[in-house]
Amino acid sequence: MTHEFEVIHQFFKPLSHSKQLCASLDMGIGDDGAVLSCRPDSQLVVVTDTLIEGIHFPYGTDAYDIAWKALAVNLSDLAAMGAAPGFFSLALTLPKSLLSAKNSQAWLKSFSQGLADLAELYDMALVGGDTTHAEHLSITITAQGWVEIGQAITRGHAQPAEDIYVSGLIGEGGLGLKIVQAQTDVVADCNEHPAVIKLNRPHPRVALGLALKGVASSAIDVSDGLLADLSHILEASEVGAVIETTAIPVSAAMQQYLQKTEDWMFPFRCGDDYELCFTAPSDKANQIAQLAESLGLSLTQIGKIHAEAGKLTLLKSGHEIKVQSTLGFEHF
């Protein structure tokens, strides 16, 4: 049987150090709470996500990938608000079956390594949390980041006539999930397929989020599906939008899937992309193109904001198409 404090000391306390925290962490793992000094020129952005086995990742997903994704989805939220990653806490609920299994130590080692590798990319430290056990595996991470006072990018400032952009490719996470679940003949080794890698180890667009401050008027990360998440911007900003569906950037594998299934709405509704959708004035187009080049990341204009609040119109080659619902992934 693996014991709680042994787990904390062996696998998670080593994650409690970072260069940037030296100036702000007064007390971390080892007490009832973390004590941090706030930066006088910044605001703190706090985000939380819970991942549950069988709902947010398939049963049998590698421990390393589970940990990576659990932190990555929080970093994606920070990126959408233009916040620089700071530190995070972890609430880990382990199944009793895992705790009593012979491979529990190997699983925990792989899990903590997944956290460590992604955290190291952004010099983040684990500052606290909790460990417990229950019937199902569950991971909750709360991440904090810094943004200059008054500079956070929110969902509520999109304006009519502005352009709508997305980063990267849309629908890859959903395609990856279909490949994993179906085990079809799309690829010989599904775990090496780019869409499956994107599903298991998303790369949050932190650098883009930081660069969009002063450029984007609003932003959101695409986690529950492009249409569903864009609808949150429209609601918060009290505006509408027109989207040209043929402009949505998708991979060759997605094109193949769409031609085979004719499920043309799939990339707009599936979740787990962790790209950014943002709006910006048209006079920022050249600046956004330069950003795309400097970051080595595609930033694609897919539509325009208009004044009719809440109305989302989809076009295909300029012709309106009817959509019954913009719902994406449902948490309930």
Image (cartoon, helix red, strand yellow):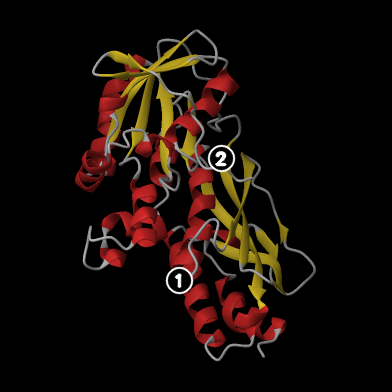
Q: Residue 219 carries which label?
A: none
Residue at the image point whose x is 44% and y is 66% from the top: 65
Is residue 308 depicted above or below 251 in this figure? above
Residue at the image point whose x is 70% and y is 86% from the top: 3
Q: Which mark is residue 147?
A: 2
The amino acid marked with disc number 1 is Tyr
The amino acid marked with disc number 2 is Val
- Judge from the rendering whether residue 273 lies leftward or rightward of residue 258; answer left or right: right
Residues at badges 2 and 1 in contact (C-beta under 8 Å)?
no
Is residue 277 depicted above or below 36 in this figure? above
**In this view, which residue lies farthest toward the top?**
307
Between residues 293 and 38, which one lies in front from this camera angle?
293
- Asked if residue 100 can be seen in this view, the reply is yes
- Judge from the rendering whether residue 227 lies leftward or rightward of residue 130; answer left or right: left
- Asked if residue 215 can be seen in this view, the reply is no
The label nearer to you, 2 versus 1, is: 1
Q: Picture quarter containing residue 323? A: top left
Residue 313: x %, y % from top left: 41, 16
Mark 1 residue crowding within 10 angstroms, few (<14) / some (14–19) / many (20+): many
Between residues 64 and 37, which one lies in front from this camera angle?
64
Q: In what element is the residue under mark 2?
A: strand
Lower sequence index among marks 2 and 1: 1
Image quarter of the N terminus:
bottom right
Is residue 324 depicted above or below 36 in this figure? above
- Judge from the rendering whether residue 24 lies leftward or rightward of residue 270; answer left or right: right
**Which residue, given by chain and number where applicable, does mark 1 sit on?**
64
Mark 2 residue crowding within 10 angstroms, few (<14) / some (14–19) / many (20+): many
Residue 292: x %, y % from top left: 27, 36
Is residue 182 depicted above or below 270 in this figure? below
Image quarter of the C terminus:
top right
Residue at the image point whose x is 62% and y is 76% from the top: 13
